[in-house]
Amino acid sequence: MNIQWFPGHMTKARRMIVDSMKIVDAVCEIVDARIPYSSRNPDLDDMTGNKPRIIALNRVDQADPEATKEWYDYFISCGYAVIETDSKSGKGINNFSKAVRELLAERISYYISKGQKGRQLRVMVVGIPNVGKSSFINRVAKRKATQTSDRPGVTRGQQWINVDNSLELFDTPGILWPRFEDQTVAENLAFTGAIRDAIMDTETLAANLMVRMVEFYPERLLERYKIEANPEKNGFELLEEAAKKRSFLLPGGEYDINRMAVIFLDEFRGGKLGRVTLEYVNTQRDVVDVLSV
């Protein structure tokens, strides 16, 4: 399954981010804690230049805590400020303002030396589609300042959100990169909903996710769907077994694999399979090192 998705508005958004970089003090990059490598746009380093960077590992409530700790330590070692957040519950959001001020301590001192004590700091918030960026901003602002949705591509334009007298956020559209060279990365984005389901083969996507669950969390398939995670079976066979356990029948007696595929993806995205991370530092180390240079 070859996955490519780059809506036209993203080209305009890329230019807008680059053009606006001169008016912000720092960049906060929202990352999906379930796929911390795949959910980082590799073009952002060039787009944001040398601006100080905060990595917000979002949706930590759905990610494997041990894997999240490894990614937290890794990003710290790369020189980023890092916070762990869950935009839905608000967990970790209160650490954001403090992290901004620590990251920009030298800049704040510079402003004070120029007689601009109390000058409002400006932080651009970036991230791929459907990573929880709008919910994150609303939590920081403590009000519904942006529109949220569980589908990608809702935020299309730029907007400033005033948090308080000392902090202002610059919201940007979620953007991907023009071509996915690594289809594993593309699959991870599709699993988590960063790519529109309308362009996907749902059964194939769900079958591939089944294979991933067999590799990383076989016990979850037994707990949730009462099926044995047999590595000798392909994903379609596992979907059929799950459909059989849930009595999803079509006229004629065949099992409704498509219905099972849709439900399986929805339950994964909704956290009903438990706290799952699909990539780890130790398996992504070489690729991540290249990305962070």
Image (tube, helix red, strand yellow):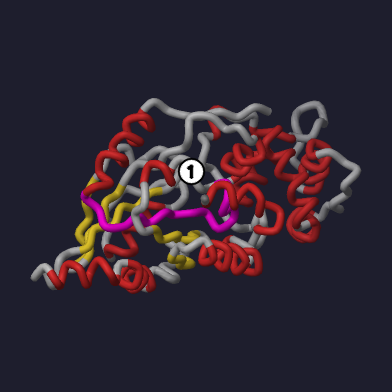
The residue beneath circle 1 is: 41
Left/right placement of residue 124 relative to residue 70 reads: left
Residue at image point 74% right, 47% down = 212
Residue at image point 15% right, 72% down = 112
Q: Position of residue 90 (x, y in %)?
A: 41, 68
Left/right placement of residue 119 relative to residue 228 reads: left
Q: Position of residue 1 (x, y in %)?
A: 68, 28
Residue at image point 22% right, 63% down = 121
Say above or below: 160 vs 66.
above
Q: Position of residue 231 (x, y in %)?
A: 87, 47
Residue 186: in magenta span: no
Residue at image point 80% right, 48% down = 245
Where are the magenta residues, as a range? 23-38
Q: Position of residue 265 (x, y in %)?
A: 63, 44
Residue lying furthest left in this view?
115
In this view, the residue in front, 53 or 5, is 53
Say above or below: 4 vs 290.
above
Which SS class for mark 1? loop
In this view, the residue in front, 92 or 227, is 92
